[in-house]
Image (cartoon, coloured by chain):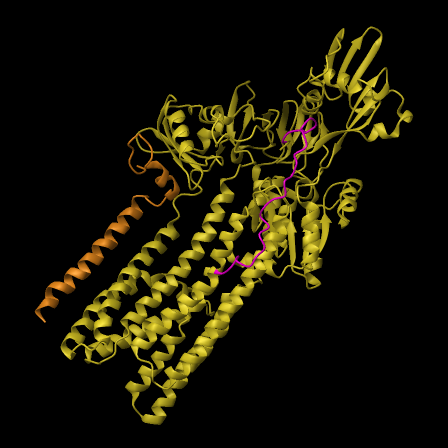
Chain colours: A yellow, B orange
């Protein structure tokens, strides 16, 4: 395979329902075509594009396929009643594909509007500037008037089209009795235009059309950058694998099977849940025994047994055997929905944070407006010339227009987002960056965050000899994930022959040779004499011969790469760290001791929120790092939150930042970038203030002409942009990951999620 | 002075043409996959921009 072949990874495949899911997620187009969007994170190069497109086009029913290198996405148009085997075709050439919601990211309308407005403003400002230059270089009165009129003709539609974005927002906030940055902008631009028009009609020498339009242009650049940054991160996060099921296989009374969307599942319906699927709504097991992975739901890392009557929460992963379950609630009343409600409640506590730019605007607008008003009144009293007083007042409005402010913050944030992106961290909006800079307490979830998302089955105690090989030989007879992990241990030893081997679901495997009985499975089933070995009872899987334990396998929490370094680094940055987990006390304590952290165990989602709130009450800025469904409310409650890419999708949506690489060092790295960004934002504000301190007295004195205003404005904007670009230069290059020697994977349990 | 009557409309007309073509490329989704477009010029198969 070429450069693009992804590493061999072991995933539990979802056996059934994938075709139905593709069908549910596809969007009907005209003339029988359907569109399906797939997210293919492994697209790297032009070769990938070609191979993927060629492989998909060969399939029956595919009308066209187009891969997108920037977005790592494939759009397929197909016809027919059943979708072509898209996923399988991609898998065959070495790409893992995930389904995307075709409807969810329909072309971003707001961005299109912003870019069009920006294009119009750019066109208008460059043309008006051309005309203005000839006016400044001393055109005669007739030419000057003509050029002013042409400028007015260009400026009017531009104001109407590009300025609308600011006017609408300003009007909305004024109607609610508040002011934001858009209010002084709108007032300034409109007054400037009105005065210039008045001057033009009365053959005046000065018109500020260029100032009005280039102001719009600069501000739109800032606005667009801000939007692009937020949207890109959001899309990238959305493009990762979805974990919550879209539908489920429902068994009707007459024995027929239907694939129903989750929203249409009613309480009492019977659902067939294959191994490897997630529970769609809260339900109760009717038939079958299996093991469940609760790590995303409650934070427990040990799989739990399920039998008849077990109550399941939505989002639990069924690991080993198919189950027949009865829905007990609808999707909107299930555990998942309850988490969403808790998140919303927690969110309301956070809205008190206001972005720096808005806080500045609140101060800025009244100051600028009163300055302008004072200038007007002052000149009326001093000279009695209303026209001159008006000109001076408007010059104040123009030179103080928060161009640098409007550009300063988004520019720094875009550069910071770019730096974070290079380190494999996605950030959702600039506000999070500002909050991240002030973090002084960090809460970690344990399962899947501090520990690796793949639990490891490790040998805890072994009687030695060929006991391991024996265990491997027995486990080769089962498809249970534990058994498969153990089976990989004995590949180089010859397998002893057994007389009979039988699997007892829910307990383990029993093998017989001569008079000996070998049992590999749950400790309480495999070991006859429990008192003989207390250690064996803690184990997850035990191999016993005639009831005596030989080998104990335990589920071992493996620290995520870089966890220890990250904690040390965070301490150095002056942040308090703590573990906040839903797992049992003993397991949490073990990890806490290894990292030297304090811990809170057995925390339910509500407890986590309460804990985070308590820290906030005490005046800390809390960063929550977590991955599970049970963390989602706490992620919202915290000032700022991070989640690994392996998190549940609800967790990823709740978090402000998502880190894509395995290493936990992303956390201190993100904080370092955020602090550098905060410093630059402060510098930019200082620059803007210095500029205003120089320009305002000139404007108040009535000494600013259009040329000076235009130069000052462009200059301040350019300075601010250049300053923002410095971000990341001084930061130590930590993104080089330490060469982690990957332990050979004999006991790696594969991705349980 | 008479030059203005030609030059100014020509200048603005050219600007408008640029603006219009930019709007067209935007509408035509030509900015959807900038990296991919750069790679696609190397492909043997002759396929146009995304339809």
Magenta stretch holds residue A743: yes
How far across and down, in percent of the image, does residue A708 sit?
33, 77
User: At x 26% / y 68%, what residue is drawn?
Assistant: A129
Looking at the figure, which quarter contains the C terminus of chain A? top right
Give the overall secondary structure of the magenta segment.
loop
- Residue A38 visible? The answer is yes
Left or right of residue A63, residue B13 in this image? left
User: At x 68% / y 45%, what residue is drawn?
Assistant: A563
Left or right of residue A137, residue A622 in this image? right
Task: Identify the residue at the far left of this view.
Answer: B2
Q: Quadrant of residue A219?
A: bottom left
Q: Nearer the viewer, residue A416 or A522?
A: A416
Left or right of residue A164, residue A304 in this image? right
How far across and down, in percent of the image, does residue A203 sit?
19, 80
How far across and down, in percent of the image, does residue A10 sit?
60, 27
Q: Quadrant of residue A173?
A: bottom left
Total marks drawn? 0
Q: Nearer the viewer, residue A3 or A458?
A: A3
User: At x 25% / y 79%, what residue is drawn?
Assistant: A206
In magenta, the rendered stretch is A726-751
- Residue A181 visible? The answer is no
Above or below A556: residue A525 = above
How far across and down, in percent of the image, does residue A58 sit?
37, 22
Magenta stretch holds residue A715: no
Q: Quadrant of residue A691?
A: bottom left
Q: Nearer the viewer, residue A229 or A634?
A: A229
């Amino acid at each position: 395979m070429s450069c693009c072949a992804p590493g061999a990874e072991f995933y539990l495949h979802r056996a059934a329902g994938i075709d139905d899911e593709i069908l549910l997620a596809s969007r009907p187009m005209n003339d029988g075509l359907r569109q399906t969007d797939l997210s293919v994170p492994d697209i790297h190069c032009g070769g990938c594009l070609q191979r993927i497109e060629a492989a998909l086009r060969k399939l029956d029913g595919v009308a066209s396929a187009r891969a997108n290198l920037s977005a790592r996405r494939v759009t397929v148009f197909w016809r027919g009643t059943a979708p072509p085997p898209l996923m399988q075709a991609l898998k065959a050439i070495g790409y893992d594909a995930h389904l995307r919601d075709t409807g969810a990211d329909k072309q971003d309308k707001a961005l299109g509007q912003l870019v069009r407005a920006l294009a119009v403003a750019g066109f208008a400002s460059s043309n008006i500037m051309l005309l203005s230059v000839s006016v400044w270089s001393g055109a005669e009165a007739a030419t000057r008037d003509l050029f002013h009129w042409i400028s007015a003709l260009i400026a009017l539609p531009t104001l109407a089209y590009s300025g609308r974005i600011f006017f609408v927002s300003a009007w909305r906030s004024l109607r609610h009795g508040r002011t934001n940055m858009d209010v002084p902008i709108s007032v300034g631009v409109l007054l400037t235009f009105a005065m210039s028009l008045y001057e033009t009609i009365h053959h005046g020498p000065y018109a500020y059309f260029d100032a009005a339009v280039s102001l719009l242009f600069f501000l739109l650049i800032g606005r667009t950058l801000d939007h692009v940054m937020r949207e890109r991160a959001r899309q990238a996060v959305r493009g990762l694998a979805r974990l919550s099921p879209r539908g489920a296989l429902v068994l009707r009374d007459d024995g027929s099977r239907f694939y129903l969307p989750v929203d249409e599942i009613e309480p009492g319906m019977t659902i067939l849940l294959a191994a490897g699927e997630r529970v769609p709504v809260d339900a109760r097991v009717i038939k079958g025994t299996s093991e469940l992975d609760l790590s995303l739901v409650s934070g427990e890392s040990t799989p739990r047994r399920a039998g008849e009557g077990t109550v399941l929460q939505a989002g639990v992963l069924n690991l080993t055997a198919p189950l027949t379950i009865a829905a007990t609630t609808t999707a909107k009343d299930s555990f998942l929905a309850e988490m969403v409600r808790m998140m919303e409640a927690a969110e309301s506590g956070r809205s008190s944070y206001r972005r720096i730019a808005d806080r500045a605007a609140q101060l800025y607008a009244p100051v600028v407006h009163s300055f302008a008003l004072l200038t007007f009144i002052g000149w009326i009293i001093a000279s009695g010339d209303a026209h001159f007083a008006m000109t001076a007042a408007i010059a104040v409005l123009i030179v103080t227009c928060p161009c640098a402010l409007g550009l300063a913050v988004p520019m720094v944030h875009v550069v910071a987002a770019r730096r974070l992106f290079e380190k494999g961290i996605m950030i959702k909006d600039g506000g999070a960056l500002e909050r991240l800079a002030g973090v002084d307490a960090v809460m970690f979830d344990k399962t899947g965050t501090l520990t690796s998302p793949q639990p490891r089955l490790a040998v805890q105690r072994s009687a030695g000899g060929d006991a391991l090989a024996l265990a491997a030989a027995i486990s080769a007879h089962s498809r249970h994930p534990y058994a498969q992990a153990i089976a990989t241990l004995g590949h180089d030893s010859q397998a002893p022959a057994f007389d009979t081997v039988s699997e007892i679901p829910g307990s383990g495997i029993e093998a017989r040779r001569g008079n000996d009985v070998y049992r590999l499975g749950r400790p309480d089933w495999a070991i006859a004499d429990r008192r003989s070995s207390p250690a064996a009872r803690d184990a997850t899987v035990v191999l016993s011969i005639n009831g005596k334990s030989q080998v104990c396998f335990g589920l071992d929490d493996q620290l995520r790469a870089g966890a220890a370094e990250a904690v040390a680094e965070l301490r150095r940055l002056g942040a308090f760290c703590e573990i906040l987990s839903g797992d049992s006390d003993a397991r949490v304590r073990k990890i806490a001791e290894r990292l030297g952290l304090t811990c809170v165990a057995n925390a339910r989602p509500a407890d986590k929120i309460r804990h985070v709130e308590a820290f906030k009450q005490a005046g800390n800025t809390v960063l929550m790092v977590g991955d599970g469904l049970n963390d989602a409310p706490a992620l919202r409650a915290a000032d700022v939150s991070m989640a690994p890419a392996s998190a549940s999708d609800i967790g990823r949506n709740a978090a402000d930042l998502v880190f894509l690489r395995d290493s936990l060092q992303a956390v201190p790295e993100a904080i370092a970038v955020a602090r550098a960004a905060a410093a630059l934002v402060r510098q930019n504000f200082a620059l803007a203030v210095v500029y205003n301190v120089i320009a305002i007295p000139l404007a108040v004195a009535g000494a600013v002409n259009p040329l000076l205003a235009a130069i000052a404005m462009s200059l301040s904007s350019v300075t601010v942009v250049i300053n923002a670009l410095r971000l990341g230069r001084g930061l130590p290059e930590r993104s080089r990951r330490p060469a982690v020697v990957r332990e050979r994977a004999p006991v790696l349990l594969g991705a349980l999620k | 002075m008479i030059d203005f009557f030609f030059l100014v409309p020509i200048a603005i007309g050219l600007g408008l043409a640029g603006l219009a073509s930019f709007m067209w490329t935007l509408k035509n989704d030509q900015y959807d996959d900038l990296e991919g477009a750069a790679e696609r010029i190397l492909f043997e198969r002759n396929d146009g921009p995304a339809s």
